[in-house]
Each structure stands twice: as structure tokens, then as C-alpha cells.
């Protein structure tokens, strides 16, 4: 099956002096797809997003964004991309409608008043359009920011940790809106730290230390990690976790409520490691590895491989 690609880039690289922030990253995103972009702070997510939308020029790499060349078509890309930054960046002494009107002016949007009204209605801001931005809660600021980056009707939205500091109800409503927009053909690349949000994405890409470690659907990412995980319940799990972490073959022992998840990359070695602790006082079950188990495993493996 042939897919229409909104993003198709190879070898994207950006250096700042001796620091390589993004190191030869390849990424494809299908049109109408929600791609979750995972990685710890300082992993290169924001730098990659800024290269993709034309704010930074790659030192190496090639490819297209919305069919425009990423090296020579930055101005064309900017007109068709919406970028939502990590921090709220609008005028707090202007109303929602005034902020949207200002952004529409910057993009030279035709029929500006109609465009502002359309954005206000689309994201449920009608009853608040005259409220000052500085008086909004985190969830409503998020809606304003999303409306602003859509005012010029882009084809691709790049969202950089858009739900940081937002309450769970607002986060859920935000993701419902994202899926509705994707259903209408809009494409998303969303940087996030939240595993529950990552699981809402069609596909994932994990970047650590500037390198893309894995990509695919949630099931594909978990499957490619080949991680074995056991759950264990019983008394004094904190002490048990400390003991297990000292055993060869145990990559992680992480509390999840009243159980531990004990994981390792080699099934046989892991089973040897936990064998002395499989006593009557503990209940052990083999479980499917979760996305968080895999995420931590890949980050730890990357750190070990980067050591001199």
C-alpha cells in the first residue's frame, strides 16, 4: 500500500559547536497521522521540530515536509505548518479574540474576522473570546494556543509538549480534539513525556541523545524491544526491588502501586536472577511489557552504549 507522506526526511542533523543535538534522524509521517515524539529533556525533540518547520536549517540531511524541500523550502513550509511551543507565548493583556486576530494578521489571513470566528467556534472558545488571556486556566490557554496555530489552516501541526501543566480532564479533552482533527486529514507530530498520551498516537518515534532509537506503532515498539517483564506482589517490595536491581539480568525493578514490574532484555538470564526470590511469600506472573517499561529500557540501554 502506498501512503501519502506529510513528512519524509533522512539524516537530519543539527550541531551547536561541539554538541550534536540531532544526529542523522530519519522520520516518515503519513498524512492524517498522529505521531508521538518521545524522549527525555535535552534529547533533541525541540531542535528536530524547529528544523522541520523551517526555523532552523539542518547541517546535514534531506527530504520533504508537505512536499517542500526541507533545505530550500522553509518559507513555503512555514505557511503550511502550525507550531505550538512549550511555553504559552501570547499577550496576556489581550483577549482571546484579539490574540487570534494578531496571529491572523501575521499570517496575512484572508477574511481575517471570519477566520478568527471560525477558530473560536471550532475549539469551543465562543463564550470566552473576550476574556483576557492572562486570566485563563492552563487548559483554556492550551485551547487558545491550539486555535492560534491553526488560524491559517495548516496541514501539519507540530506540538511541543502541549499538555505540560494541564489537568487530566483538560488533557483528555485536548486529545479528543486532536483525534477529531486528524480524522479530518490534519497531520500531527506531538512531543510528549506522558506514556498514556503516547499510547493515543497512531505511531511513535523515540529519540535519545539526538539519535532515533525506535519507531512504529505502540505494538511494534514494544515488540522490537524484546523485553521480558514479570509482575510480583508481596511484602516489603521496596527492599525486594533494591535486591533485584543488584542481580545480573535485571534491567529494572519499578513499583506500580502494590506490585513491582521486573524486566530484562534476556529472558533466560532474567529468570535465573529472580529464581531465588520465587518463594511462597511472593506471587509472580509473567506479563506483557508496557510502553513505560520499554521506554526506560531503551533509555538505559542507550546510556550504556554511549559510555566510553
Image: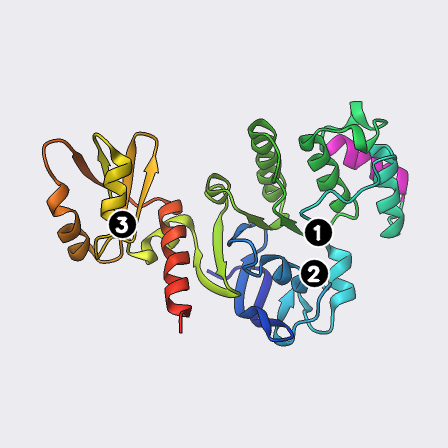
Q: Nearer the viewer, mark 3 or mark 1?
A: 3
The residue carrying pointer 3 sits among few (fewer than 14), some (14 to 19) or many (20 or more) residues within 10 Å by Cα, namely: some
Would you call the spot at circle 1 few (<14 residues within 10 Å), some (14-19), or many (20 or more)? many
In the rendered structure, are the residues bearing label 3 and label 1 in contact, judged by CB atoms less than 8 Å apart? no
Query: How far apart are labels 3 and 1 at the CA level?
Result: 42 Å
In this view, 38 is above or below 213: above
The residue that label 1 is drawn on is: 83
Left/right of residue 289 with respect to residue 194 in the rendered view: left
The residue that mark 2 highlights is: 53
Contact (Cβ within 8 Å) of mark 2 with mark 1 = yes
Badge number at residue 175: none
Q: Quadrant of the C terminus?
A: bottom left
Task: Tell me if I can see residue 228 in this picture.
Answer: no
**Is residue 298 something one can see in this rendering?**
yes
- In space, the residues marked 3 and 2 are separated at their CA atoms by 43 Å
Q: Secondary structure at mark 3?
A: helix
* Circle nearer the N terminus (3, 2): 2
Amino acid at each position: 500500500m502506498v501512503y501519502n507522506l506529510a513528512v519524509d526526511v533522512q539524516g537530519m542533523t543539527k550541531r551547536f559547536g561541539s554538541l550534536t543535538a540531532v544526529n542523522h534522524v530519519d522520520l516518515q509521517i503519513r498524512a492524517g497521522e498522529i505521531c508521538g515524539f518521545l524522549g527525555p529533556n535535552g534529547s533533541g525533540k525541540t531542535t528536530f521540530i524547529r528544523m522541520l518547520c523551517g526555523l532552523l536549517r539542518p547541517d546535514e540531511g534531506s527530504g520533504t515536509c508537505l512536499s517542500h524541500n526541507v533545505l530550500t523550502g522553509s518559507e513555503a513550509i512555514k505557511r503550511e505548518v502550525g507550531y505550538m511551543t512549550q511555553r504559552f507565548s501570547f499577550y496576556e493583556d489581550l483577549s482571546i479574540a484579539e490574540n487570534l486576530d494578531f496571529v491572523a494578521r501575521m499570517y496575512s489571513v484572508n477574511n481575517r474576522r471570519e477566520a478568527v470566528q471560525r477558530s473560536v467556534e471550532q475549539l469551543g472558545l465562543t463564550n470566552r473570546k473576550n476574556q483576557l488571556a492572562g486570566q485563563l486556566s492552563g487548559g483554556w490557554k492550551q485551547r487558545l494556543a491550539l486555535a492560534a496555530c491553526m488560524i491559517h489552516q495548516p496541514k501539519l501541526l507540530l506540538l511541543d509538549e502541549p499538555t505540560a501543566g494541564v489537568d487530566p480532564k483538560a488533557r483528555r479533552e485536548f486529545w479528543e480534539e486532536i483525534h477529531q482533527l486528524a480524522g479530518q486529514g490534519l497531520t500531527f507530530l506531538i512531543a510528549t513525556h506522558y506514556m498514556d498520551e503516547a499510547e493515543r498516537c497512531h505511531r511513535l518515534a523515540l529519540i535519545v541523545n539526538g539519535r532515533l532509537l525506535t519507531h512504529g506503532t505502540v505494538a511494534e515498539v514494544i515488540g522490537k524491544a524484546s523485553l521480558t517483564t514479570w509482575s510480583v506482589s508481596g511484602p516489603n517490595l521496596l527492599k525486594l526491588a533494591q535486591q533485584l536491581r543488584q542481580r545480573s539480568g535485571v534491567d529494572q525493578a519499578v513499583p506500580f502501586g502494590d506490585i513491582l514490574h521486573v524486566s530484562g532484555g534476556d529472558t533466560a538470564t532474567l529468570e535465573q536472577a529472580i529464581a531465588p526470590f520465587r518463594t511462597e511469600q511472593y506471587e509472580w506472573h509473567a506479563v506483557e511489557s508496557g510502553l513505560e517499561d520499554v521506554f526506560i529500557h531503551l533509555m538505559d540501554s542507550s546510556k550504556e552504549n554511549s559510555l566510553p
